[in-house]
Amino acid sequence: MTSFPIPARSDSARQSLTDPDADALFPASDAGSDLEERPRRRPRVTADQLLEGLNEPQREAVVHEGAPLLVVAGAGSGKTRVLTRRIAWLISERKAHPGSILAITFTNKAAAEMRARVEDLVGGRAKIMWVSTFHSACVRILRKEVERFGYKSGFSIYDAADQKRLMALVCKDLELDPKRYPPNAVLHWVSNHKNDLVDHESAAARADNDLERTYAEAYSLYQQRLKSANAMDFDDLIMTTVHLLQAFPDVRETYRRRFRHVLVDEYQDTNHAQYALVRELCAEDPSAYDAGSDPDAVGPAELMVVGDADQSIYAFRGANIRNILDFEEDFPQSRTILLEQNYRSTQNILSAANAVISRNQGRKPKNLWSDQGRGEPIVGYVADDEHDEARFVAKEIDTLTDAKAARPGDVAVFYRTNAQSRVFEEVFIRTGMPYKVVGGVRFYERKEVRDAIAYLRMLANTDDEISLRRVVNEPKRGIGDRAIACVEAMARRDGTTFFEALQHAEDAPGIATRSVTCIAGFVAMVEELQSMVDAGERADVVLEATLARSGYLAALEESEDPQDETRLDNLAELVAVAREFADEPVPPPSDDPADLTPARPGVPEFLERVSLVADSDQIPDQDDESLGVVTLMTLHTAKGLEFPVVFLTGLEDGVFPHQRSLGDRTELEEERRLAYVGLTRAEQRLYVSRALVRSAWGAPAHNPASRFLDELPDEVMDWRRTAAEQSSWNRSVMPQLPTRRFGSASAKADAEARGQKREVPSLSPGDRVTHDSFGMGTVVAVEGAADKAVASIDFGSDGVKRLLLRYAPVEKL
Ligand SMILES: Nc1ncnc2c1ncn2[C@@H]1O[C@H](COP(=O)(O)OP(=O)(O)OP(=O)(O)O)[C@@H](O)[C@H]1O
Ligand SMILES: [Mg+2]
């Protein structure tokens, strides 16, 4: 059996949860260099210490008691810090049982950080509190309660790819024309309904045209298939929990008794289902706040939500900005606290962010200020093209690190869409800049990783047909499509699961004897591995055994495809992840009967962990000692984080704001909020850039400057290069741009940069040419004709350039 190395663990992350004051509360003797001297229990923190480093309204929010509390404030004003301190305060000062606390964060990583921070403050007893995402919290409740809805506790969680496969199967079964009913569109429709807590029966009842009726039919069959696979998709997790709490008063009572404190970060991005969940858990009846109420009755839990309507960026996933705007109406006795001081950014950065967000209509104006002084100006750069933009970013990071003004780990590069990362990666690899891309093709989306997870899922839940089908003949073991069809037909006829049918494949009409033998071997392997899972064996041990016993590793090892070596590395990484998971200390069993903390880190618990990882959970931990790595990510992933140095790239109309949003005011407002999120991640230095020419679908696109760029106040800007200062090549490639809105500074610059129209040289591959800046070159390829002709020309050491011939200063020799 191959044995896998464990990668080194890194240290604390550079996230906004980082609270340097918390470290100050514990002197170095407690930090752990001298083990013998180290006290076993942390000293109890005093109330003063818990409130240290907080301003007055922040303190009020920490110590507030009773009525629901809303903290609304702009970016970087300490909302997350207040929420974290409040948890510590509840445990330490108000003697709340840690198990009675439910804190909701937007990502698993933020949850881990928050838990660690609270543990720093009040010690290990904080371990048993629930700090998690909505999804993780729901999974824990469902594992315990969902049998009431006819699911088994070991249900699988289907991610986006599984959902797509299943919906494609459903659409095929319903014989839907994929052009008229693309499975993705159907899924989106279903997801929207689930986020609004509309189940398939209600969706069918509401449907009032053919399209809707067809969608509802697909919804219904999709749910049926999920249920028979004992699986739920992401949206089900929330909707089913809400329905469970609504349908079973005793269950609701259990959790209301358990959770006496509910705290939600990033409340502006909750959708209706999540909002309903909070309401179910906190009881709606505000009269219960009366002091003289029956002591035995469970009053409502104390609720605290924090958020910023200007940072709501998930409307496309059903987030409802009204949840935060309507809080005061929904919870009439609530109290609202505003925070106005920003501790993250310099005044220049805040002025830039405020200038952009203030153009959104119908928002409550905020008075966010910083006492850090103006700081560095915001650096602007207009690049020739996306490669030039990436080179500028790399060079600038180099300059900062050389001057010891920043380490690579202090820097983040943001872009609107994942595809934009590639060019940065190319340049960073070339220049040896250490970096990590967050998101994109994620680790857990790679084929081999999905296969391995599918094996584990199928072992934990043989009803999970999607996973079972994925691995039944992977690696190839002689179980072909025909054999599968025979077994499937028998399963349908007899009303059994696919796995039950596999267990007596010999009875399947029409099946070949050879297939029966192969299937028997597969079933024996599954049963053997299953017994390990049932015995509670560690996830890493089961995973290693599975990869070996299934022949999966052997197949990769024998392969001559160089990609398969990378696949082996990825599987080694997955085993290491499982090993780390299994090695995590299990919290001590609590005396609380409602405590749902898993007792052992077995396969089901591991699957739960990996099913719920999100892009933002891959943000690299930046070890304080090392130089760290530059983080590349989309703006959506950047929420809640902060970095000393931020590059906001691709600021072009059509890129950011995204093409899709250009004609739609609501969508443009969401893009603007995304820009606000991006700008406010920066602590000290902020760079904004755009490219005059960017390749899109293989052809150069000439996008005008992003309107967000135009909105940045002149007095905070330091333009390193404007459109007017482009190289002669670019001046001549710039096409006639569409007339810009109101003659802004950069629009003027754009106009200046426009070249003269000239005659298009007619070129074909092999022709020798000369270019004003690049000199002699050879034409490699020509696409398009006349005005649209684009030539790829090899200029030797300058590389191959793609030039729009209409504007390029090229002459045929
Ligand atoms: N009173 C304070 N004194 C000093 N630093 C503070 C104070 N309050 C918050 N901070 C620091 O300011 C930064 C921003 O805080 P935090 O991340 O909690 O803000 P936020 O409101 O949650 O931001 P976002 O809206 O981006 O989520 C953090 O580095 C935090 O430690
Ligand atoms: Mg925050």
Image (tube, rainbow, N blue to C red):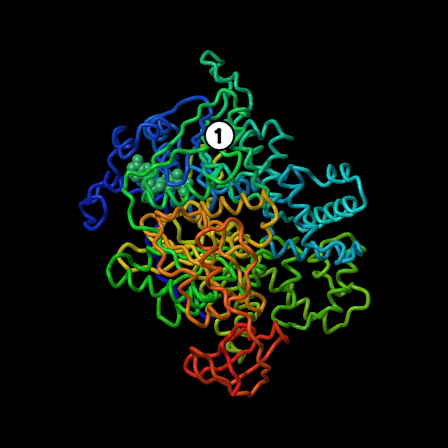
Whereabouts is ligand 1, in terms of quadrant? top left
- Asked whether, in this view, residue 705 is left or right of residue 153, the answer is left
- Asked whether, in this view, residue 549 is left or right of residue 643, the answer is right
Q: Position of residue 633 (x, y in %)?
A: 45, 56
Nearest the eye: 764 or 370: 764
- Name which residue lies at 45% across and 72% down: 729
Secondary structure beneath dot 1 equals helix
Q: Is residue 46 above or below residue 587?
A: above
Q: Quadrant of residue 161?
A: bottom right
Q: Is residue 748 visible to us here?
A: yes
Mark 1 residue type:
Arg
Q: Is residue 754 above or below residue 46?
A: below
Residue to which mark 1 is pinned: 258
Q: Is residue 578 visible to us here?
A: no
- Name which residue lies at 43% across and 66% down: 425
- Asked whether, in this view, residue 92 is left or right of residue 389, the answer is left
Nearest the eye: 65 or 463: 65
Count of numbered marks = 1
Nearest the eye: 297 or 633: 633
Label 1 beta carbon less than 8 Å to ligand 2: no
Q: Position of residue 741 (x, y in %)?
A: 53, 50
Q: Position of residue 37 (x, y in %)?
A: 18, 45
Dot 1 surroundings within 10 Å: few (below 14), some, or many (20 or more)?
Answer: many
Q: Is residue 442 above or below residue 322?
A: below
